[in-house]
Amino acid sequence: MKKTLIFITTIIVAFSLSACNLFGPSPDEVTTEFLTSVQKGEWEKASKYVNNTDTKKTLKELTSSKDEEAKFMLGLFKKMSFTVGKVKEADKKATVESTIKTVDMKIILGTIIEEVMQEALAQAFSGEEADDEAIEKEMTNKLVAGVNEPSAKKVTNKVKINLVKVDGYWKVDVDQELLNALTGELTSVGDEMEGGKLNPFGK
């Protein structure tokens, strides 16, 4: 009888573990995998954990991109650290309380804008015609240098990451709050200045 009970218990435990795997990773596991993929610049992998069509498209485009904007994003995200905490799950929706720390882009962007404005004014007084393309390139280069500066200050954001269950698997629903935390509050500056033009994920 004792051996029979042990055998039945073993079967039940094994089945329980298998059942967990059948339903895929939990919301906090998916969140961790997504953030880790972004942190490492593994865009293709990160896109697999995302529900948003626009975000998926942008992440996949980054996979083959070698331009300065891609370098900027890679530099920004590699400086990111995060913790994943409490999970709330109801039906096909879940939220994961997370903390994301990364370079404070408000400080960097503020400094860059001030420098570029001073240079533009100097050009205007000297009678030189402003070269918009050159200015844009200079700003991008300064952004890359700014995020890679070892002494760059960081900002911490607490965010509730939303997930939805799609075909039995949890997917991250990338919203403005998450984007703002990931980009060191860059998207909030972009929204104020250019209606979200600086949003790297194109949402």
Image: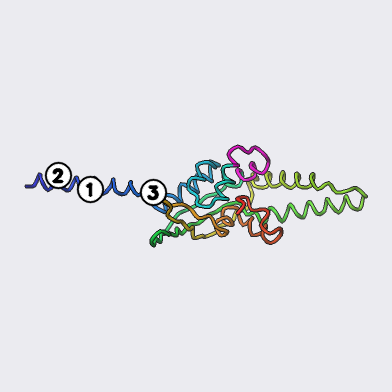
Query: Which residue corresponds to mark 1?
Result: 13
Query: Which residue corresponds to mark 3?
Result: 25
For image coordinates 28% across by 45% down, the residue present is: 18
Amino acid type at circle 2 is: Phe
Q: Is residue 203 left or right of residue 126?
A: left
Q: Label 3: state its secondary structure.
A: loop
Q: Label 1: state its secondary structure.
A: helix
Mark 3 and mark 1 lie on one chain; the one further toward the N terminus is 1
The reply to whether discs 2 and 1 touch (Cβ–Cβ < 8 Å) is no
What segment carries the magenta color? 61-74
Q: CA distance from mark 3 to mark 1?
A: 18 Å
Q: Label 2: state its secondary structure.
A: helix
Question: Is disc 3 surrounded by few (<14), some (14 to 19) or many (20+) residues within 10 Å?
Answer: some
Query: Which residue corresponds to mark 2?
Result: 7
For image coordinates 68% across by 44% down, the residue present is: 145
Overall secondary structure of the magenta section:
helix
* 148 magenta-colored: no
Q: Residue 155: x, y in percent?
A: 59, 56
